[in-house]
Amino acid sequence: MEKYEERMTIDEERKYLHKMRIRYWKAKSRKERSKLLDEMQEVTGKHRKSLIRLINGDLARKRRRRERGPTYGTEVVDAVKKIAYCLDFPCAERLQPILVRTGKQLIHHGELSISKDTLEKLGRVSISTVRRMIGPVTHIPQRISAVRKPNRRKQTYLRTIPTKRIAWDEQEIGHWEVDTVHHCGVSASGQYVHTLQATEVVTGWVECAAVLGRSYRVIQAGFERIQARALPPFREIHPDNGSEFFNAHLLRFWGEQFSDAQISRSRPYQKNDNRFVEENNASLVRAYVGYQRLDTIAQTLLLNKFYTKLCLYHNFFQPCMRQIEKIYPTNSGTRSIRKHDIARTPFDRYLASGLLSPIEKARLSAMRMHINPMQLREEIEETLTQLAQLPMAKEGVVEDVHETLLCDVDKWTITSPSSPYYDEIDLTIR
């Protein structure tokens, strides 16, 4: 079996000789030095006298006193550039093997006029030489992809919205992270239901709304539903970079309905910037609704009834924990550690915020006492069973999303900006 031997490069030879020179100088006898020269001669393939001159001299590589002239003339360079232009400037590794063939084809069609000698030289040009002739492909302004500027219209609204990340230890109530969850099943084709979810960072208050599709009208209706039920105020709305949020219609709606709220967005491809709402996407939406496809009006309406019960169940009865910073003294000063605080419901956190008057606190607390959490749990389970039994959309039948806009917002009785009443459960306090 033949052994594969690869010749050492000049840099590898110099590194090897640097190490061998130390051994050569430390050798105490002429015989030992002769053995080292034999070893170096076998490894490098150089003559003994050449090795002696290198070891006794300077091993650093020297610049040429006289640079070598160009191997190929301007005719070869112009031919390579014209062939590269014809093929929209592929990289040198792709261009070099087909230089001759493409050159002959361009000559046949009268696009290129070169001599036989130049055509022969095109077959000898190396990849590195082609790379030097055409330059870096990414910096060539004549490429079609560089001439045709990408469409930036959809980013027009994004550029006006600042990117940020809501602090993990935010103390002011009213910062809402927003996201959409797709209920498309295994296929994202056609129109299907989305869950519009909003999470208040400080209290952990969650509101969800089901919408059919992602048009501005249904997203607006989803925000109207969320706004009518949420107790905490809206001081900031913080979605991701989806086009369902950043368009002229929804930005106008936000400006009208949330005029005092700041609009911000997460950084592209950084899901952790919306970590609070992303966590609830899994623990609330996916955990209860699952991953099946929902694509009908009936499913949308029933899912909205389910979210009314689920958000009431979560916000009023489900305790949640929030990270806080604890400062501990040490020998060298202090040390901060993130820990979880005592578990409290989002409703209790909002009551302790000081944003409500004593009368509102008493009335809302009485409202919670009026709700039977066991009955609410059974209703949630029953609604999910009904949702699973609803049929999917029939092929060829178009669902009218306007029928989902006749939501229950108009049926709710709002007695004050911070005290919603839910129509699905009788919360009338007498």
Image (cartoon, helix red, strand yellow):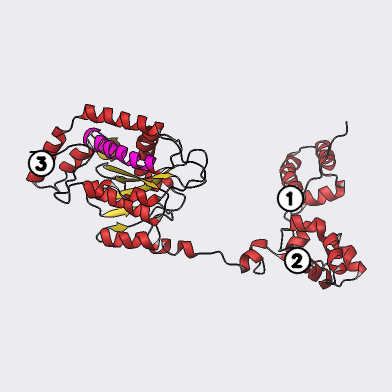
Residue 430, horizontal then vertical, whole percent = 7, 38
Q: Looking at the rendered structure, which numbered label has been put on residue 363?
A: 3
**Residue 315 sits in which quadrant?**
top left
User: Do labels 1 and 2 touch, CB within 8 Å?
Assistant: no
Residue 182 magenta-highlighted = no
Marks 3 and 1, how far apart at CA: 83 Å
Separation of disc 1 and disc 2 at Cα?
A: 38 Å
The magenta stretch is: 298-321
Q: Which residue is mark 2?
A: 86
Depicted 218 relative to depicted 71: above or below = above
Q: Residue 138 placed where, x, y %?
A: 64, 62
Q: Which residue is mark 1?
A: 11
Front residue (pair 208, 13) = 208
Drawn side of residue 390 relative to residue 334, left or right:
right
Category of crowding for the residue at label 3, using alpha-carbon neighbours closer than 10 angstroms: few (below 14), some (14–19), many (at least 20): few
Is residue 230 visible in the rendered image? The answer is no
Q: Residues within 10 Å of mark 2 (few under 14, many from 20)?
A: some
Q: CA distance from mark 3 to mark 2?
A: 77 Å
Is 36 on the left or on the right of 170, as rendered? Answer: right
Mark 1: which amino acid? Asp
Q: Earlier in the sequence, mark 3 or mark 2?
A: 2
Tell me the mark number nearer the camera, choosing from 1 and 2: 2
Front position among marks 3 and 1: 3
In this view, 113 is above or below 192? below
Q: Earlier in the sequence, mark 1 or mark 2?
A: 1
> Amino acid under label 3?
Arg
